[in-house]
Amino acid sequence: MSKLFNNYTHSYMTYLQIEKNSSVHTVNNYRDDLEHFFMFMNEQQVQELADVTHQTARLYLTTLHEKKMARATASRRISALRGFYRFLMREQIVGENPFLLVHRPKGTKKLPSFFYEEEMKELFEAADGDDDLSVRNRALLELLYGTGIRVSECAALSIADLDLHLGVVLVHGKGGKERYVPFGSFASEAVEAYLQKSRPVLMHNGEHQKLFVNFRGAPITTGGIRYILNGLIKKASLSGSIHPHMLRHSFATHLLNNGADMRTVQELLGHASLSSTQMYTHVTKEHLQKTYRNHHPRA
């Protein structure tokens, strides 16, 4: 990739981080997407970004299809390039957006995986224990399930974000958006026990204010949280491994199963669009159908 392309990529990444408040994960993915397209340009002997036409863009999409790339990945790559060219037009580097009329591949929607309430009870039993790490793990599990926050949002929490008296937590979500999420007495008691008993010991006289810490006293990472949750899965003898969002999916599904309205769940999850929340209706319908088949005498 030429130095000029490097400059364009760097400028676009800066734009995503500062002006669009995109996550580090999104920025890294988009950087990979641009580099992949630049290699394609080199193979096609297209020398300049302004030389990319609608036909070039369609050929690139065909190439992704021929390589049997996952639809979600191909769709993201087209989205990244559409945004990149929109940025280049704004900076008056190119005159048109060749990806504007290229249709992104539609991905197959998968129903979110979640734990049944009986499985959640097994997980909580697996987190029981009086040692410092067990007390921390219980607090972590209770807060994730009690609020439905993302694993990344949980890792970013500071002690000051919690109000144990009111039972709410200030969550720093995607795109710099903040929201208050309530939590119940189980999460409140577990977190308070962790703060009073375990965190001071795990900190080893450290001074940072991140809520959850690892056994060395450093702020816990998203990978660390997944490691803890997978350990609880094995201890509970539940099959498979835990997906980072499974507790979040369980939170939403259990709320809807017990009568919560869609708009409230949308606000609690921090979804910008109601359509993102509506995927859980398919899960709850499946749950109702299963209950009907198992219990109705003429099902």
Image (tube, rainbow, N blue to C red):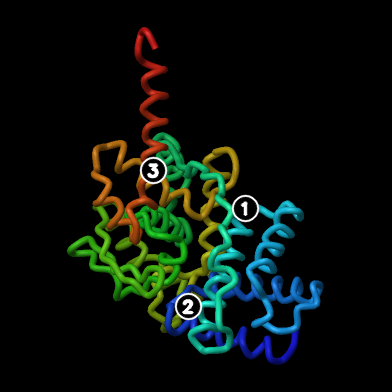
Say whether residue 205 is visible: yes
Amino acid type, mark 1: Arg
- Give 247 or 165, whichever is nearer the viewer: 247
Which is nearer the N-term, disc 1 or disc 3?
A: 1
Q: Residue 86's spot in the image, x, y percent?
A: 51, 77
Instruction: Decide: few, some or many residues near mark 3? Use Cα within 10 Å; few <14, some 14-19, many ≥20.
Output: many
Residue 204, horizontal then vertical, whole percent: 48, 78
User: Disc 3 on helix, strand or loop?
Assistant: helix
Label 1 to label 3: alpha-carbon separation: 22 Å
Label ID, residue 280: 3
Disc with the residue nearer the chain's start (2 vs 3): 2
- Residue 137's disc is none
Res. 255 image quadrant: top left
- For the residues carrying marks 1 and 2, which lies nearer the camera in this image? 1
Residue 41: quarter of image: bottom right
Q: How far across and down, in percent of the image, does residue 51 sit?
A: 68, 80
Name the residue: 58% across, 84% down: 94
Please name the residue shown 52% across and 53% down the image.
229
